[in-house]
Image (cartoon, rainbow, N blue to C red):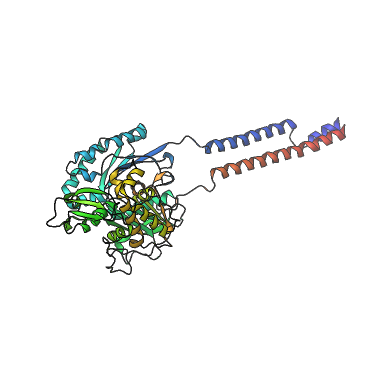
Amino acid sequence: MSAQREMKEKNPWPTPVTIIIIIVIGVIAIVALVTVAVLQNKSVPQKYKYGIVLDAGSSHTALYIYQWPAEKDNNTGRVEQTHSCKVKGKGISSYASEPWKAGESLKECMGEAENTVPKERAHETPLYLGATAGMRLLDIVNSSASKNVFQAVEKALQNSPFSYQGARILSGQEEGAFGWVTVNYLDDRLKQGLKTTGALDLGGASTQISFISDNFDGSESPINSVNFRLYGNDYNLYTHSFLCYGKDQVLKMVLANQTQSGATTVLDPCFHSGYNETKNYSVLYDSPCVSGRKPQEAPEKFDHIGKGNFQECQKAVKSVFNFTFCKHSRCSFNGVFQPPLQGPFGAFSAYYFVMNFLNLTDTSMPLETVKQKLSQYCGTSWDKIKRQHPTVNVKYLAEYCFSGTYILTLLTEGYDFTAETYSNIKFIKKIKGSDAGWTLGYMLNLTNMIPAEAPDSPPLPHAGYVSIVTLMTILLIGLLLFVALRIFWPRCSKKTQIV
């Protein structure tokens, strides 16, 4: 007994009960650590903020609603389109003589916006309206009418529950640049610093081309240069907008060229054979793109008769381009500087809708095959076309031959896409659920949702962080068990020897 008492007095290790208590406390502490880490980083139900942009184009107005994570408002939240609404009727510029109707036309889509954005978020949701080429043209012809239209629109938007931020006319350069931002933002090219995609936008009254070129520093044509610093990367963007070269205005220019003599009958190769409509000279020449060319002795009306010939149509379309004048080292058309094309391009808006209707969006198809298919389509009789597409608006249906021919001519003759580079074009409507167009880029710019510098990010992703904590916990538990065994094993052996 005295020997056992002497060994206990000399033994420096804690008693078994004490060791068990220490191990239990250690395990509880480790489990608590893991639980807190997991709960702290656990995803919670997402709350969103919203923004609304109205695209007041020449032919129609569209409303887009965007959302992004509320807790990531400072430069890190991904903005996505959550709803869109096409306003019934024509563009707001068409209401120049009845401006109040411009405001009235927006009510239905604004109602949809009120039903989409949560009421508690409405007062903080910014609302913008941007007008493009249609209003640019109206402002040139009648600035007071343009002002009246904007007043009517503003009155309607100010009565909404949203935070109205104003309505204005975008410059052609802004329209092109913001379209480029949208395409590359949605494709995650800006945040990741990847090679960018060029943007090709086609509307009713203007068309834009925007891309990054290694051969463009802005010095030769500063007016076509826009500089961005986004996510820590610098971009020197080439962009140009051609007013009057949207598909609707080009159609007026082509028809104007064919009616210079004041003819009462026009045989048009860009419309299907069998097409025959009586049209007014006053309506044809009501645009500033053609108003200065109206014949002096023009009759009131003319018969517009289709001929359906793609080759002749292309010649007629080419007549509205000037390929001879160029004071720069190189030009696209009408004396406008353009650097060499570079990289892939996304073609959206009317580019997509026209080519999609014609089943010609597959750019892996050889360019010559595209022309052959379009030639066959243009050569189809008007009666057959109407039978094949009974639900399509007749006005739009009649113009697809012209519009397709114009698009190919603009891309190949105007912008210099070749048989080899044509496949670099991708006709797009949406990117990851959001419409391609200038509206998202416009809102991102006004809300500063894209930082100039790359935002800081944690050293480890959530999954990696939890994995490391869990691994360290397992190692600590293993270490405690090892220590416990080292303590108890020799104690038990000694007790056995003493007995």
Is 42 located above or below residue 196 in the figure? Answer: above
Is residue 157 shown left or right of residue 83?
left
At x 53%, y 37%, the residue is 42
Q: How many marks?
A: 0
Q: Quadrant of residue 325?
A: bottom left
Residue 466: percent from left, percent from top: 58, 41
Q: Split into 4 quadrants, where in the image is the N terminus?
A: top right
Residue 257: percent from left, percent from top: 22, 59
Is 239 located above or below residue 46 in the figure? Answer: below
Is 230 located above or below residue 79 in the figure? Answer: below
At x 54%, y 43%, the residue is 462
Is residue 216 shown left or right of residue 153?
right
Is 125 located above or below residue 371 in the figure? Answer: above
Which sits in the foreground, 207 or 81?
A: 207
**Residue that sits furthest to the left in the current view:** 297
Which sits in the foreground, 267 or 230?
A: 267
Which sits in the foreground, 436 or 120?
A: 436
Which sits in the foreground, 346 or 153?
A: 346
Q: Is residue 10 visible?
A: no
Residue 335: percent from left, percent from top: 28, 65
